Amino acid sequence: MSDTVGARPRLYGRSKGRPLRPHQQRLMDELYPVVRVENQPNMSEFKEVWMEIGFGGAEHLLHLAQGNPETAIIGAEPFLNGVAKAVGGIHDFGLKNLFLHHGDARDVMDSFSDHLLSRLYILFPDPWPKSRHNKRRIINEAFLEDVSRVLKPGGTLYFASDIIDYVDWTVTRLNQNGRFSLVIESPSAWREPYPGWPGTRYESKAIKAGRPCHYLKFRHAA
């Protein structure tokens, strides 16, 4: 199987797990089209637009939306079961500011106007730890060009991982890009979760396994 679709590298990962429960399937059929980001004519009513790529079980995504009702929150996730959890949260909490994309985040980013986002979150992405699989990591030169286009000058890219090799990989590539600077608020800031951090299941698994987590912030220059 080729690693590219056209000229764009593929994103790898599961797209579906266990079958959805009837309630989840009903919400996907009825509510997902309403909150699908592609179906939003504009977001000018919101003060800012933030995005999370690969939101997994949607713990952090729903936390962001609940705590920031005047901000449009966009979540992109290829895993159907994760999207169903986010849709369930939108229903349960009556959220009006959370919009979703089921699929490759880059496809919806292509439709964004320049400098739309004030924040972009990439939290505990698949590390693809084997060297021959490193090319599958979402953090790469081409993707950072997309990020640089859609993130505002002064905007923030949040990246968290429990895999030190991926942390080094990410810092190196953002430094090479030249338009991102690592925000160092204190010597130990990288070990401390972001303010208001709700925790995620993946993070809990990493901590239980004895893997220290790293929480980085990068400021976008232009």
Image: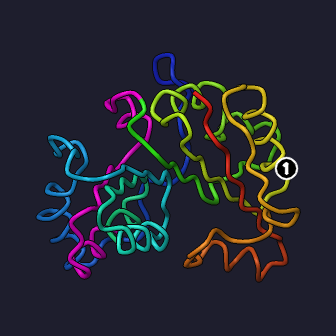
Rendered position, 87 above or below 169 = below
Q: Amino acid at mark 1?
A: Asp
Residue under label 1, please give it: 165
- Per the image, is 88 magenta? yes
Q: Which residue sits at x=62%, y=31%?
A: 221
Q: Position of residue 147 (x, y in %)?
A: 53, 34
Q: Residue furthest top?
A: 7
- Could you say which is closer to the camera, residue 30 or residue 192? 192
Q: Which residues are magenta?
A: 86-114
Is residue 159 or residue 36 the one in the foreground? 159
Query: Which secondary structure, mark 1?
Result: helix
* Label tally: 1
Percent of width and height locating residue 87: 27, 68
Tag 1: Cα neighbours inside 10 Å, few (<14), some, or many (≥20)?
few
In the image, taking residue 164 as reference, residue 160 lies left or right, namely left
Query: Going by the image, does 94 lie left or right of 150?
Result: left
In reply to whether residue 52 is colored magenta, the answer given is no
- In the image shown, does 69 or 166 lie closer to the viewer? 69
Which residue is at a point 68% across and 35% down the rendered structure image? 180
Residue at 49% across, 70% down: 60
112 relative position to 140: left or right: left
Question: Where is residue 123 drawn, in percent x and y?
Answer: 60, 58
